[in-house]
Amino acid sequence: MRLRHNPLAQPRVPITITMPDGSLREGTAWETSPLDIAKQIAKSLAERVVIAKVKTVQKTERTVADLEHLFDTFARCDLSFP
């Protein structure tokens, strides 16, 4: 399987992740994942979250992403848990 983008070769630039309540979280492109965002909010959230819904500025719809998905640009992120 070939990766579309090699994460190791991508530029590390500051990005902002918007949460459903409108709050903003800072991250770094190609380093920050939804799990990292959950850990920023609370350790207990990071332990409970199971999936993320991500919408980047290039897409019109949210896509389901695993918790290790690396943000590559500014995005909106909904964290889901049971």
Image: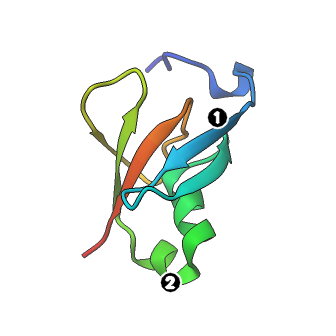
Q: What's the amino acid at mark 2? A: Ser
Q: What's the amino acid at mark 1? A: Trp
Is 74 or 39 nearer to us in this picture?
A: 74
Q: Which residue shows up at 55% across the image and 40% down it?
A: 70
Query: In the current view of this chain or complex, which residue is farthest to the front?
Result: 22
- Looking at the picture, how far across and down is residue 24, in whole percent? 56, 54
Is the residue 12 above or below the residue 54 in the image? above
Crowd around label 1: few <14 · some 14–19 · many ≥20 (10 Å) = many
- Looking at the picture, how far across and down is residue 43, in whole percent? 57, 80
How many marks overall?
2
Is the residue 74 above or below the residue 38 in the image? above
Q: Which residue shows up at 49% across the image and 16% down it?
A: 4
Q: Horizontally, is 21 left or right of 2 in the view?
A: left
Q: Horizontally, is 71 left or right of 19 in the view?
A: right
Query: In the current view of this chain or complex, which residue is farthest to the bottom?
Result: 44
- Looking at the picture, how far across and down is residue 30, in whole percent? 64, 34
Which quadrant of the rendered structure holds the C terminus? Answer: bottom left
Residue assigned mark 2: 44
Q: In terms of image quadrants, where is residue 57?
A: top left
Residue assigned mark 1: 30
